[in-house]
Amino acid sequence: MRARHSLYLFTIPALLVIGLFFVHPIILTFDMSLTNFKGIGEAKEVGWRNYERIFGRDRYIREIWLTLWYTVIVVSALTVTGLFFAAMLHRLPLIRNFSRAALYTPAMMSFVVVGYVWQFLYSPLNGGINVALRDLGLGGWEQNWLGDPALALYSVAFTQVWMFTGFTCAIFLAGFAGIPEEINEAGRLEGASSWQRFRYLELPLLGPSITVSVMLTTIGTLKTFELPFILTKGGPDGATRLLSIDIIDNLFGQYKFGFASALSIVMLVIVLAVAFLQNKILRDREHAQ
């Protein structure tokens, strides 16, 4: 009994940090979301009016759905590309370490640097992508990658996928490293092809790695702000205006602290709900396998 009490005592510092730097700010943010605070002066209580405004206007509902759709695109692409490169490198040990470092390098770069580099590449005049297409004789494929509302969101998503593919690849490589070699050897003895070993032996055992990768990339993508802001600032015509951009705009652009707090609480609820559902579904899938 005394040992158990000692273990509980060791959790007190962590609980204090969580309470002071996470729970307390959330409570203050929720309290501010019930006001019309402008950053100066006295905050006037407005009840649930900020939330009624969010869910009563199509603009904010559209931003919520756009954020969710952007997350689906990025997380799906990151999972597939990361798994693909990890499976390839797992079978190529001679270049594994070098390639892993090369793939992970973009994830260590600043969002600002990545954003401005890709903004140049996407330029409709002399951007790297259009120039390359022109030199390859594919001038008809040139696009206004960030200026076309039909393409802008996917162009921003591609940039984020390029940046973090190495991150998901590293997670899956760790998962591959935990698979006993005897399982693959048994598959070879049974005459299974490389694809069959991956599909029926390795992929089910990568369940925990898939859960970790999907959870981390989902949470990070839902609250992403830097790349959409640097590349398009939410344009064109609101095609890339995610919920995070509206939060920053209301907070630092219009000084609507109360309304920005309400948007932040909505985003927090969405992140928690999506993370909970994902965790339950993926954990159930792991146990089923």
Image (spheres, rainbow, N blue to C red):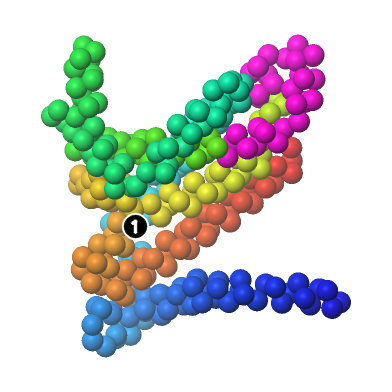
Question: Which residue is depicted at the point 50% across and 28% down?
Answer: 98
List x then y, in percent, for residue 238: 24, 49
- Magenta residues: mostly which secondary structure? helix
Question: In the picture shown, does residue 22 fall above or below 244?
Answer: below
Task: Decide if residue 58 is in sight here.
Answer: no
- Helix or strand or loop: what does disc 1 sit on? helix
Question: Which residue is depicted at the point 32% across and 68% down?
Answer: 260
In-front residue for pair 227/50? 227
List x then y, in percent, for residue 67: 38, 50
In-front residue for pair 219/35? 219
Question: In the picture shown, does residue 228 fall above or below 23?
Answer: above
Task: Decide if residue 289 is in sight here.
Answer: yes
Task: Answer with left or right where residue 188 lies relative to residue 76.
Answer: right
List x then y, in percent, for residue 277: 58, 53
Q: Which residues are magenta?
A: 171-199
Split into 4 quadrants, where in the image is the N terminus? bottom right
Task: Answer with left or right where residue 25 lies relative to residue 199.
Answer: left
Task: Answer with left or right where residue 138 lies relative to residue 195.
Answer: left
Give residue 253's quadrant in the image. Answer: bottom left
Give residue 199's quadrant in the image. Answer: top right
Split into 4 quadrants, where in the image is the C terminus? top right
The amino acid at mark 1 is Ser
Q: Is residue 111 magenta?
A: no
Question: Which residue is depicted at the point 33% across and 80% down?
Answer: 35
